[in-house]
Image (spheres, rainbow, N blue to C red):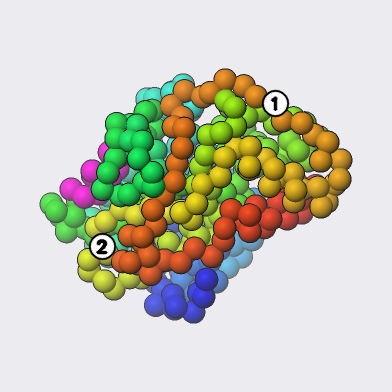
Amino acid sequence: MNIDQFTALKGKQILVTGGAGFIGSNLCEILLHIGAKVRCLDNFATGHRHNIAPFLSNNNFTLLEGDIRDLETCHKACNKADFVLHQAALGSVPRSINDPITSNEVNVSGFLNMLVAARDAGVKRFVYAASSSTYGDHEALPKVENKIGKPLSPYAITKYVNELYAENFYTTYGLNTIGLRYFNVFGRRQDPNGAYAAVIPLFVKQFMNHESPVINGDGTYSRDFTYIDNVLQMNLLALTTERKSALNQVYNTAVGDRTTLLELTSHLKKYLAEYDKKINDVTVTHGPNRKGDIPHSLASVAKAETLLGYTPTHTIEAGIKAAVNWYWTHLK
């Protein structure tokens, strides 16, 4: 990705909600590198201070500690912002099944607060993290943006509601929005700890500790695992596109390829074993399938390629290699 094409963002005031999280902190970093003025809003429920520690000495970076469930905080965060990158959410299907009320409060009520605050502040564009979970029980592959099924979890419902609200705020108030349906994003700074850790950082940590990862099911479920740099590119393209037809749309944010969980563990072992040969001997175990999980996920990225000029830079293997290198450096 050539960041020189995004120099239009230099000097712009950009709010990143959830900016201390995995994706949010990576967005803050690349925006600062471009020369934007970055305001990070986070309540540190799932984000980490160490993710943004390197930015605190940057004059173009401001940290606002607060919760999107508080409308006054959202208004303060959006004040004089040119653009909003809304990443703040409670992720995880299992978390939403265990606690649907909090997921709804953050992901729906918090999202609505942010839309209202962005509208009132005259924000030029509101780009938000949507989710591939919106496809629900629609079985056809690859997934195309205009064909979805019924959501299979409270989390999926909240992310679909986000899309409906975003569309309504454009038609009702003229707020330009773009939704990015993330497909299993992974990479540097993704937290390997906690009850709801994503599969890749969790497996990396377990392999590094010579512990057997547990695959839910027989390992044939597949996902469109998407490296963080592809996601950064999509966010920057969404912020800077001048094509009117590209606005007020949702886009798959993915690679356009799928990998089974068995293939994933094979890739992880291959690259981790370059640092520690004993990892080759770690076996993988299997558990029951997880509630709310869909068997297969594969995105069509044709819409993003056509309207935004998106070109994925990292395949699953290239992304895994880069992620493993980062984890080995930072977890050891």
Any part of residue 66 in sight: no
Q: Which residues are magenta?
A: 159-168
Left or right position of 109 against 260? left
Badge 2 element: loop
Any part of residue 219 in sight: yes
Which residue bears the numbered disc 1?
A: 285
Where is residue 27 shown, x and y percent of the image?
50, 60
In the rendered image, residue 78 lying in the magenta stretch gets the answer no
Residue at the image point whose x is 38% and y is 69% from the top: 309
Instruction: For marks 2 and 1, give the one nearer the viewer.
Output: 1
Where is residue 162 shown, x and y percent of the image?
30, 43
Where is residue 137 shown, x and y percent of the image?
34, 31
Real-space Cα separation, disc 2 to disc 1, in angstroms: 45 Å
Where is residue 166 shown, x and y percent of the image?
25, 49
Circle 2 packing at 10 Å, graded few (<14), some (14-19), many (20+), is many
Circle 1 packing at 10 Å, graded few (<14), some (14-19), many (20+), is few
Classify residue 161 by image quadrant. Answer: top left
Residue type at mark 1?
Thr
Note whether 128 is above or below 90 in the view shown.
below
Note whether 79 is above or below 99 in the view shown.
below
Left or right position of 66 against 270? left
Q: Are marks 2 and 1 in contact (CB under 8 Å)?
A: no
- Total labels: the figure holds 2
Left or right position of 185 against 167? right
Residue at the image point whose x is 45% and y is 41% from the top: 297
First in sequence, mark 2 or 1: give its number.
2
Residue type at mark 2?
Leu
Which residue bears the numbered disc 2?
A: 247
Q: Residue furthest left?
A: 172
Residue at the image point whose x is 75% and y is 48% from the top: 270
Badge 1 element: strand
